[in-house]
Amino acid sequence: MAGLEIRPLSAPDEVRTYLGGTGETQTVQLGPGLVGRHLAEPGWRWSEHVKPLAGTDFCQTRHLGYVISGRMHVVMDDGSEGECGPGDAIHIPPGHDAWVVGDEPCVFVDFGQLQDSAQPH
């Protein structure tokens, strides 16, 4: 059994910066996986600021998290869509685009599959 682990997201193991200075993902390793804090500034859009890094038509990362602040609109590759905001628990399967809605940065904590998020595929 692994021992107790407590890690501050303010001291990440890795920071992945989005193109154009539009935000970043900070990650810490805990047990068998990563926990991330995404910060996306107003104007951020996955298809503009991460797609060139990922090299895929849609985000292929599964996100499972909690929105702390701001709003984000998500469109799946099947055409379904929704918007999340503060206090929302979210599950976003692979195959999506997303963008910040409004003038406030969107911040959410992510327990999904972050190994390849905002990384070249």
Image (cartoon, helix red, strand yellow):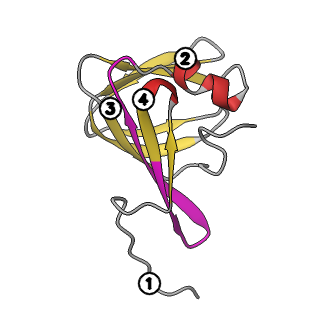
Residue 99 relative to residue 46: left or right: left
Q: Position of residue 76 (x, y in %)?
A: 59, 20
Give the position of the N terminus as an image quadrant: bottom right
In the picture of the structure, the residue carrying the numbered disc 2 is 48
Q: Between disc 4 and disc 1, whose residue precedes?
A: 1
Residue nearest the observer in this picture, 17 or 31:
17
Q: Position of residue 4 (x, y in %)?
A: 44, 84
Magenta segment, principal secondary structure?
strand
Mark 1 vs mark 2, foreground winner is 2
Marks 3/1 in contact by CB < 8 Å: the verdict is no
In the picture of the structure, the residue carrying the numbered disc 4 is 21
Q: Secondary structure at mark 3?
A: strand
Q: Between disc 1 and disc 2, whose residue precedes?
A: 1
Q: Between disc 2 and disc 4, whose residue precedes?
A: 4
Residue 120 visible? The answer is: yes
Q: Between disc 2 and disc 3, whose residue precedes?
A: 2
In the picture of the structure, the residue carrying the numbered disc 1 is 4
State the CA–CA distance, disc 1 to disc 2.
39 Å
Residue 27: in magenta span? yes
